[in-house]
Amino acid sequence: MVECFFCFANFVTTANGEFLLNGMRFRFLGTNCYYLHYSSDEVIDDLLISASQMNLEVLRIWGFLDGESYCRSKKTYMHPSIGVFGIPETVSGVKNGFERLDYIIQKAKTVDIKLIIVLVNNWDDFGGMNQYVNWFNEKHHDDFYTNEKIKQEYKKYIEYLLNRINVYTNIAYKDEPTIMAWELANEPRCETDKSGRTLLNWVREMSEFIKSIDQNHLVGVGDEGFFNSHSNFYPYKNFASWTYSGFSGVDWERLLSIESIDFATFHLYPTHWQVPNNEIEPWGLKWIEDHIKMAKSFSKPVILEEFGVPKTVENRSQIYELWLKKFYELGGDGAMFWMLAAKGEGRDKDLNGYFPDYDGFRVLNDDSLEAKIFRKIAQVIGRNAN
């Protein structure tokens, strides 16, 4: 057996409930961007340079594009059909999404940004779990977690990705220190099993499978952090009580007990979860506190990996600042706002040349108050802090 050349240098690891990078504690502010894996070099460069200028140290991206129709709509092929990874011989004039990932990785390396790569979507955007369900003629979204043929196809995709050799760096993904972590899914839910057991078993099986191939990288769930009813935490003023009740089939506490899950993730979207606008700030502060307490009880690092308040909320920038202040004061390890955008192209471009603000959460590297707050916090928290 050949020893890994890198010997864990520049890989993010964990110890005593914290992230470590080259022997030092690694805390960060980062962001998300879902459109890079079907974008041009110019767009990828612009986004990563913008992130670097904002002192953002981690970028969470999609590592999937499932289904012929979704691949065709983006003119980028990754996983168009069962067992097919890349561009089929019958298709021409499109991009290879894996080559796009190769390029993202090598560009991120040049600007010293770590990547968290997500492996499938809970939602139908870019194919997701329902595409797997449809491939195998099953009937319900949650069959993704239990059907053996579906699970084997997902594992084949993972194995292909982890063993891929980057055409720009000549390094296998499983040996690439620019990749910080793999995440099993974006916001997985299993509402047909409120106990959380189905999702728990799937997470254990898939995280152990990744570890059997790749011992270099961290593995996370990528979930929203929903509690189950046996938890000792309760929602602020009972708003969005379903996020604490097990309604979504997620049991955050038990997910953290899985040995092959290295860190905790949670998301924060009060307006999407029916919290009134005038209660967004305190509800979010309680949500942050509850998650950090539980993650630390398992001695695992914790990432607030998606959060957002629509621009229609008047005090959005103040809310962001207070949330992040509380998160880091309580010992949080990394926070990642949704989402940084930069240059757009084709139909995905507004009148000013930027990727459009489709969901109302977009942040640009500009003179906005939000951008100024993020740059300031990133400078204080990150590796280059004084």
Image (cartoon, rainbow, N blue to C red):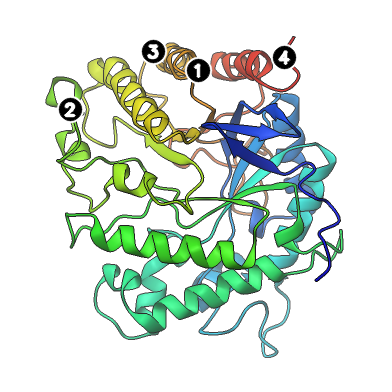
Residue 234 image label: 2
Image location (x, y in percent) of residue 260: 48, 54
User: Foreground residue, 129 or 95?
Assistant: 129
Q: Residue placed at 51% from the left, 74% from the top?
A: 155
User: Which label's residue is closer to the chain start, 3 or 2?
Assistant: 2
Give, as a three-letter code, the residue at label 1.
Tyr
Inter-mark Cα distance, 3 to 2: 25 Å
User: Foreground residue, 203 or 212?
Assistant: 212
User: Which label's residue is closer to the chain start, 4 or 3?
Assistant: 3
Q: Quadrant of residue 228?
A: top left
Residue, disc 4: 385
Give, as a three-letter code, the residue at label 4.
Ala
Circle 4 Cα neighbour tier, 10 Å, few/some/many (<14 / 14–19 / ≥20): few
Callout 4 touching callout 1 (CB < 8 Å)? no
Image location (x, y in percent) of residue 316: 41, 18
Circle 2 Cα neighbour tier, 10 Å, few/some/many (<14 / 14–19 / ≥20): some
User: Which label's residue is closer to the chain start, 4 or 1?
Assistant: 1
Residue 21 image label: none
Give, as a three-letter code, the residue at label 2.
Tyr
Inter-mark Cα distance, 4 to 1: 14 Å
Give, as a three-letter code, the residue at label 3.
Asn
Residue, disc 1: 328
What is the secondary structure assignment of the residue under circle 3?
Answer: loop
Q: Residue placed at 84% from the left, 67% from the top?
A: 2
Q: Is residue 64 visible?
A: no
Residue 315 image label: 3
